[in-house]
Image: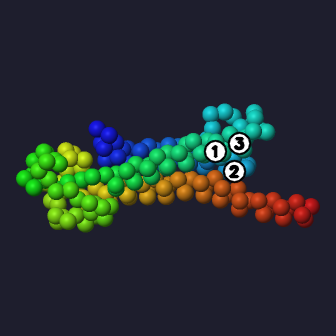
Amino acid sequence: MLMLLPLLGVPVVATLCVWSLWWAKAFAKRHTDGAWFDKVVTKSDLRLISDKARTVAIWSLILFVALPLLGLAILEGTFLHGNFYFAVDGNFSCPQNCKEEVGVLAHFWPANGLPDVFKTAYRYDGSLTYVPVWQPTLWLLFGVGALIYAVSYLRLIFGNSASRQPSVQIQEATS
């Protein structure tokens, strides 16, 4: 049951990361004026706690962007280092009647050949139907997609405020 988590958890966690970042990105797009921490979604109104707004925004980014991505990376690593087998007779009786596929690269180039997507004889953690090459590639794409979306969110937050800073300083210097 424990190995079911990395196998099915990667697409679920990646989808939840993108979904929550989509809402955060929509919030950041509506709050284009102000400092970077005004664009971060928090539970409290940052205008009411202006002396701690930056700290609350940093903790919000750590808890709702960094930690989910770290969890996703751990799931991806656990998934790629998990055991999977080739069922010699095509049954679900692994690991008794199966050959173990060894190494991370075996997920992408299994020793017993590329599987038929609909009649695969590969089993992840002994009993779960598994399709090498296709599943790990899709799972990595889920993770990379979530990471790219997180980077685009962070660029939206920090990129706009950083690009505004020099123009404000130039206007202050000319006044």
Of callouts 2 and 3, the N-terminal one: 2
Q: Residue 88: name its quadrant.
A: bottom left
Crowd rating for badge 3 (residues with CA inside 10 Å; few <14, some 14–19, many 20+)? few
Q: Nearer the viewer, mark 3 or mark 1?
A: 3
Question: Foreground residue, 55 or 160?
Answer: 55
Q: Quadrant of the C terminus?
A: bottom right
User: Disc 2 and disc 1: Cα gap in Å?
Assistant: 7 Å
Amino acid, disc 2:
Trp
The alpha-carbon separation of the residues under discs 3 and 1 comes to 11 Å
Determine whether 85 is above or below 170 in the image.
Answer: above
Would you name the residue on which mark 1 appears?
40
Give the structural element (helix, strand or loop) at label 1: loop
Asked if disc 2 and disc 1 are in contact, CB closer than 8 Å, the reply is yes
x, y percent for residue 75: 40, 48
Q: Residue at 71%, 42% (x, y): give it.
A: 55
What's the colour scheme?
Answer: rainbow
Disc 3 or 1, which lies upstream in sequence? 1
Q: Amino acid at mark 3?
A: Thr
Say whether residue 113 is visible.
Answer: yes
Q: CA distance from mark 2 to mark 3?
A: 12 Å
Tell me which residue sits at (60%, 46%) in the image.
Answer: 61
SS for callout 2? helix
Q: Is residue 54 left or right of residue 110?
A: right
Residue at 56 percent of width and 53 percent of height: 153
* Amino acid type indicated by mark 1: Val
Residue 30 spot, x, y in % from top left: 62, 46
- Name the residue beneath numbered marker 2: 36
Reading the image, the residue beneath label 3 is: 55
